[in-house]
Amino acid sequence: MTDSIKTSSTKKNPNYISASESRKISSENRRITDALEKKYNRKHVPESEYLTTMKDPNNTVEFDDLHTYFFTDIGTVRAVDGVSFAVPQGKTVGIVGESGCGKSVTSLSLMQLVQRPQGQIVRGQIRFNLGDKAYDIAKMPGNMMEKIRGNEVSMIFQEPMTSLNPVFRIGDQINEVIMLHYPEKSEAEVRDHSLHMLDLVGIANPEGIYMRYPHELSGGMRQRVMIAMAIACDPKLVIADEPTTALDVTIQAQILDLFRNLKEKINSSIMLITHDLGVIAEMADFVVVMYAGRIVEKGTANEIFLHPAHPYTVGLMASKPVVNRKVDRLYSIPGSVPSPIHMPDYCYFRDRCDRRFDMCNGPYPAEFQLSDTHKVSCYHYRDGAASNRALHNNGFEILN
Amino acid sequence: MNDNNTMLEVKNLQKFFPIKSGFFGRVVGQVKAVDGVSFSIERGKTMGLVGESGCGKTTVGKTILRLNSKTGGEVYFNGKEIFGLGNAEMLKMRPHMQIIFQDPYSSLSPRLPVGEIIGEAVREHQIVPPNEFDDYVTRIMQACGLQEYHKDRYPHEFSGGQRQRICIARALALNPDFVVCDEPVSALDVSIQAQIINLLEDLQKEFNLAYLFISHDLSVVQHISDTVGVMYLGNLVEFANKDEIFSNPLHPYTKALFSAIPIPDPTVRRNRIILEGSIPSPANPPSGCKFHTRCTYAMERCKVEVPVQLDKGNGHMVACHLYDDNSGSEKQPETDEASFRAIGEQYDKANENKTESNPA
């Protein structure tokens, strides 16, 4: 942040970039992204290059030290900076965090939909389990990814109006997905499949909706159509990026109910991205809390909600009013997220943290284990589970 | 208007928008955005207005500030009917009633520096003498958590939370008695929401403001409000003070709405009332009680007869035939009070455990 307009044109400002510096950054970015693009656009890549093995065969996806950077003209934005977590088969993993914390970029990396050429996966692995074999999506070339995207992994976006094409009928849009991934199906079979999908997502009149245009449907109906499209090819993983944020609370309840019922029917894993802790608590088996491109805490839903450890998680929960829990004053986390280009070399949350101590000046804290599933990146928990009990009681003073 | 403490009184307010069609703009129908809404707000208190999108919350907010014309009904502000005022009188009234809009990105002029955005109306309404103008703007900015050097900056240089602070400063600079907050936090992140809500509460204490807090986020409304009104399709279906309405919701719609709130505690599981379908079009609302198409308790009577506001004690108003004693029907819905209480108890228990397990 610049201190005032007057100083923004002087070199005293740490964020100031001269024209020649900017040109230097651009050409350097160009060099890096060109090399990565060339690799991505190759044809006839041997399968062995991206074939990998899962650490745990029960996982659908394993993110391992994923780094996704955006190379902009004012510097490199580390949108995802070393993220590791796994999505077990048939489970729901919720990712929480504020806007700009990298939760969407993580899921877009998995779909290989990061805005190229600026956005690039520079390091790490995304191991995707296809049953008999596993692929590393971070290394997969574009033409191979097309067979996976929409078929094995699919995505439900936040805004159902903008993600449906306004000039095609609902039926045609669902048919397109099915025809692309099942070319052997006849036209009548595709139609039947589409109608079955519309029926599955609780649309009362599938034949009628099949012929409608998106603008004729309400927000909740559109989101149902998006879900029908996402599960049309029986994917192993569905990514739901803020699926209910744009909807009213009663419609949100309908859609969450639908998700819960569908999970039993389709047996796929769900990655649920949202900033609403209530939605996460209802849906997720595992929770990942992200802050400024890194995971600060992960664990099962019970661990995160009943024993939150990281000061950010505790603060996030305390800052949201809860119905029928009275507080005189909401806790508010002071300050704001650091600039994504000039990340500090100490803990990213230190400057906003009310429990910082001298160790926090050291390098970014590693992950400390509190239980088999519960991990947290905070020096307060360096002794693992032993330090947990005393400290999280401390943290709960804010919540109570 | 016998009660001096009442600042705003709305009586049977109606606002219809015409649907025009054809080359000559013939009026073919009306969207009944607000259809008979009555409530009052006391000085220094907050009224929360909740409901689904399209139920007319924002139209109520705008109409009581005379930003819209009205179709029927009366709005008394400090005892004066604001739609009866002339232009000059209305101009004098304007500083007393202000609004904070939902989207801080589109409600600030991108071409004006922040000092001018906040100060423009102060100068126009001559709130302070010209020689005190600069100090006054600075003081208001500081009260809203902005720094003096922000004055020369433009809105695009600020983050969402700070822009919302600018909007709040702009509204407060005129020294209002009453502020309509139209979803002031729904465009913001959770941690920033808490900052803005705290700021609004602090300013309310400092300046003795009354708020009409419009939101679809029930947990925020419960936190900030003194009284709560629930709207459905242009009607106020239930109105009561906060504790009363959250512990004992009467109207079936209020119950469904409250049961749909996701609770951030994975151990809480409750029977959710899931409403089928979505809100009907306000251009062609259902007959009788507008909620009967989605109501689980709907009776024959609901389809024909429009329910009136009934007072169930303590100023708890509800518009539902179920509570009409003259109806002769014994069918009272089992209240969800029990389930709500259970949730509260679970919270208490969880908190107790935490304190007990504290070794210190």
Image (tube, rainbow, N blue to C red):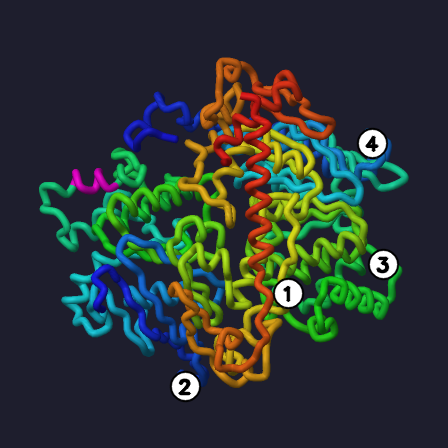
Mark number, residue A56: 4
Q: Could you tell me residue A185's position as x and y percent?
A: 87, 62
Q: Residue at x 16, y 38 (%)?
A: B135
In three-dimensional space, the C-alpha distance between marks 1 and 2, rounded to whole angstroms, equals: 32 Å
The residue pinned by badge 3 equals: A183
Name which quarter of the figure residue A382 lies in: top right
Q: Could you tell me residue A380's position as x and y percent?
A: 57, 20
Q: Residue at x 48, y 71 (%)?
A: B233
In three-dimensional space, the C-alpha distance between marks 3 and 1, rounded to whole angstroms, equals: 28 Å
Of all chains, the one bearing label 2 is: B
Of the pair A88 and B329, the residue shown nearer to us: B329
The residue pinned by badge 1 equals: A221
Of all chains, the one bearing label 3 is: A
Q: Would you call the spot at circle 2 few (<14 residues within 10 Å), some (14-19), or many (20 or more)? A: few
User: In the rendered structure, which amino acid carries the disc numbered 1?
Assistant: Met
Of the pair B311 and A74, the residue shown nearer to us: B311
Q: Which residues are magenta?
A: B134-140
